[in-house]
Amino acid sequence: MSKIKIAELFYSIQGEGRYMGVPSVFLRTFGCNFTCDGFGMPRGEQSKERDFIAADIKKFFKYEDLPLVSSGCDSYASWDPRFKDLSPLMETDGIAERIMEILPYKTWVDEHLVITGGEPLLGWQRAYPELLDHVYMKQLKEITFETNGTQPLTPEFKEYLQDWSMQIPGERCVTFSVSAKLPASGENWFDAIRPEVVCEYQEVGIVYLKFVVATAEDVIDAENAVEEFREAGFNGHVYLMPVGGIESVYTLNAKNVALAAMKRGWRYSDRLQVPLFKNEWGT
Ligand code: SF4
């Protein structure tokens, strides 16, 4: 049986993007190809917050005991190898059983499944079909992959998802919420902006871009990125979203981000998990 290393598995409200407000099961897989240490930092500087936390790793026995950060990747423990022991390797059967336990009616009703990370489209692609074919997952109709948009789908997984959607035509839907990383993340443009990868997701389902911005410079970067994606054939919606983390950062940022989105005919995405749940783990 296939196994997936799971950083978090919880039930909450989707706080961002197309499914904002929808009750959702979040499956946060372990591993990422980026580090995004630039978030919340002056350009060119890197956050050291998770290094301080890692230095005290022996103090933390559960993922949800880890401190939240206000700079760098806010889900650092889902990929930094120093925290890997807090993320169990679970068999797909065990994951499906756990999902049934946390769903309010012990079956899928109107909830949607969010497969997030880390970067969920790394090697776990090979294990998802076994999970999605589990008898407990038969009623599931909507899945979102929250991805950084750099990982191509394997031919096998691409075909699997296309078939999965067609099993209940008109009801099943796969969405790719692509949070392409701009220079403010600290990642290199040519590694992070991969239009050819993102355009291929369009052969499977609905795809939208979601840019995390904090400054006018970030918005210009988003414009340049959108131009590249459009030139390559991207035809989905574009969202701007304020930087997450601590609530004061988010609140200062939100209105200007909304205005910047309106000016360009783009969508604004909130981060409902911040005002509702203070961005705690498991939300
Ligand atoms: S791509 Fe996402 S999960 Fe990976 S380091 Fe960046 S913000 Fe964190």
Image (cartoon, grey):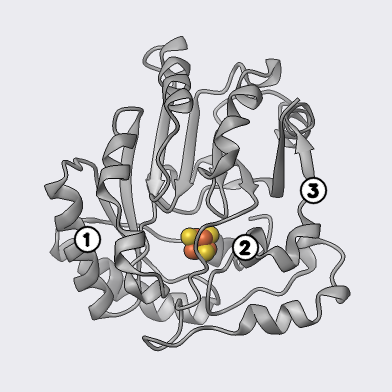
First along the sequence among labels 3 and 2 = 3
Q: CA distance from mark 1 to mark 3?
A: 36 Å
Q: Is residue 6 above or below residue 202?
A: below
Give the left or right position of residue 19, taking residue 88 as reference. left
Of pointers 1 and 3, the one earlier in the residue sequence: 3
Q: Quadrant of the C terminus?
A: bottom right
Dot 1 surroundings within 10 Å: few (below 14), some, or many (20 or more)? many
Q: Which residue is mark 2?
A: 277
| Vertical order, 196 against 108 (above or below) | below
Q: Secondary structure at mark 1?
A: helix
Label 2 or label 1, whichever comes before in sequence order: 1
Query: Mark 2 near mark 1, Cβ–Cβ under 8 Å?
Result: no
Q: Amino acid at mark 1?
A: Ala
Which residue is depicted at the point 51% across and 58% down? 33
* Residue 211 in picture, x, y percent from top left: 33, 61
Amino acid type, residue under disc 3 in the picture = Pro
Name the amino acid, label 2. Phe
Q: Position of residue 148 (x, y in %)?
A: 42, 53
